Amino acid sequence: MQSKKIPSKIEDISKYMKDHVGVGKSYDFGFREIVVLKRKIQIYYVNGLVDSSIIVKLMEELLYLNDHEIQYKKAPEIIENRLIHEQVEKVKTLDEAVDQVLSGLIAIFVDGFDQSFIVDVRHYPGRSPEEPDTERVIRGSRDGFTENIVENTGLTRRRIRDERLRHEMMKVGERSKTDVCVGYIEDVADNDFVKYAKERLEAMEVDGIPMADKTVEEFILGHKWTPFPMVRYTERPDVAASHLMDGHVILYIDTSPTVIILPTTYINCLEHAEEYRQAPSIGTYIRWTRLLAVFLSVFLLPLWLLFTLEPSLLPHSLQFIGPGKEGHIPIVLQIIMAEVGVEFMRMAAVHTPTPLATAMGLIAAVLIGDIAIQVGFFSPEVILYVAIATIGSYVTPSYELSVANKILMFFLVIVTAIFRTNGFILGTLIIFLYLISLKAFRTPYLSPFIPFDPGAMLRFLLRIPMPYANTRPNYVHPKNFYSQPLKNSEKK
């Protein structure tokens, strides 16, 4: 449908705003009419999204013209020149003007002039940047993304002062018209990745994205039913900047404090900023410890169940790991019930008010950790191994990946309980083949393990000192493979 051009008569504009936008009905849609140089001027804005002090200052400057200007025929040019703001543009259609007003800008219409002046006076309500709870570090920056897309791009720009860093703004949602920004470094990021991301965003046909980043992910990526994260989320500007430097594409969604990193892999979701804030040897130790915790969160309970069902697989010296007292319920049901109970506590902790969280934790510990064992509901070994596996899932850097790994653990426990040794081996093989089949944003999900890239795998297994980590990952297909400028002698 073709957009309606801005009429030159101010009365037609006023009628359109009343009929289509709800001026006079919606209390938050502000309107002010003044007379400047014998012409009516209408100013439209949305309360709560604008800085009212700037609007007052603009009106003072415009009214000042009545006392010091006499060239009434050049009113539009004079008015534009007196809009004392660093960002002023003109639009020619009413749809564009309304979209800008609803985004927090103001639209100024002049009687007899068929264009509108758009002035950026946005002042979104929100909180100040603070360290995200899910990505804390011992040492490092304490700022984090907020719900304001302008602040978020600014936090990234502060870390990458490169003229080739691009932030391209788009609008998504027929009704919400949410701002979505595509960020990338022009001479590093792969053109196909950037083009594909923008094409997928433009192809989104949806009323709105009130759930922001997750809705965007489900629209632009395939494998909608897979439990594994097909993108990486982060609330840390330093993590986002680091991925931009590697050649990734970043999606900023207004109203979301989380940005989307494209493409991502299973291995990429296992990295954490803390490893790069410590010495390389310490970072390597932290990473290996984290990998062990992730492995235990998936395989500890299925393996222990297998050894419980097949005691002959254990050497005599390790017989003690089996259940000393099985209780009144089969071991497999104990494991499932204990894991479900842990999920109950996790969800309760999220929804419990902070003053009551400690009391809730004490009650859960007494009921599950002591009374349940005394009455024979759980064996002590089940509680121990479930606790270790749960800690391993909490150590996983990506929350989405930790939940996906828990689903894998349930799957392995069930097939091991049914088919024992064959079930454990077959279940592990099915998981591995499934991960191989996945592609996240046209990228093999197990890169750089499959297809194998020895350099990238070494960089993952060891926290390489930064002077030697001079290459970018192959799976993002960077235009510039080397991350450090070559010396003149090397260029020759």
Image: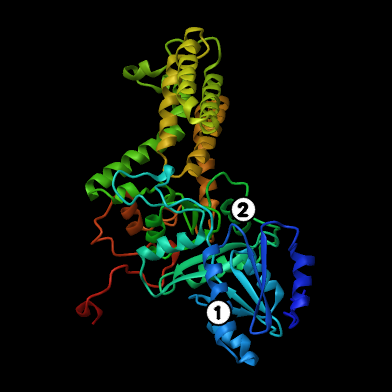
Horizontal and vertical percent position of residue 79: 58, 83
Residue 346, above or below 5: above
Horizontal and vertical percent position of residue 482: 32, 69
Horizontal and vertical percent position of residue 93: 70, 77
Separation of residues labelled 2 and 1 (CA atoms): 48 Å
Q: Along the line of sight, which residue is nearer the eye, 431 or 91? A: 91
The residue depicted at 43 percent of the width and 63 percent of the height is: 154
Q: Which quarter of the figure has residue 312?
A: top left
Marks 2 and 1, the one that precedes in the sequence: 1
Which amino acid does the dot numbered 2 rest on? Thr
Label 1 crowd (10 A; few <14 / some 14-19 / many >=20): some
Residue 433, above or below 201: above
Residue carrying label 2: 215
Q: Along the line of sight, which residue is nearer the eye, 141 or 117? A: 117
Residue 121, above or below 301: below
Which amino acid does the dot numbered 1 rest on? Tyr
Q: Which mark is residue 272?
A: none
Q: Secondary structure at mark 1?
A: helix
Q: Along the line of sight, which residue is nearer the eye, 217 or 170? A: 170
Horizontal and vertical percent position of residue 392: 41, 34
The residue depicted at 59 percent of the width and 87 percent of the height is: 77
* Residue 28 shows in the view: yes
Q: Which quarter of the figure has residue 459?
A: bottom left
Residue carrying label 1: 64
Placement of the N terminus among the 4 image quadrants: bottom right
Number of marks in picture? 2
Q: Along the line of sight, which residue is nearer the eye, 257 or 280? A: 257
Q: Which quarter of the figure has residue 120?
A: bottom right
Placement of the C terminus among the 4 image quadrants: bottom left
* Residue 2 shows in the view: no
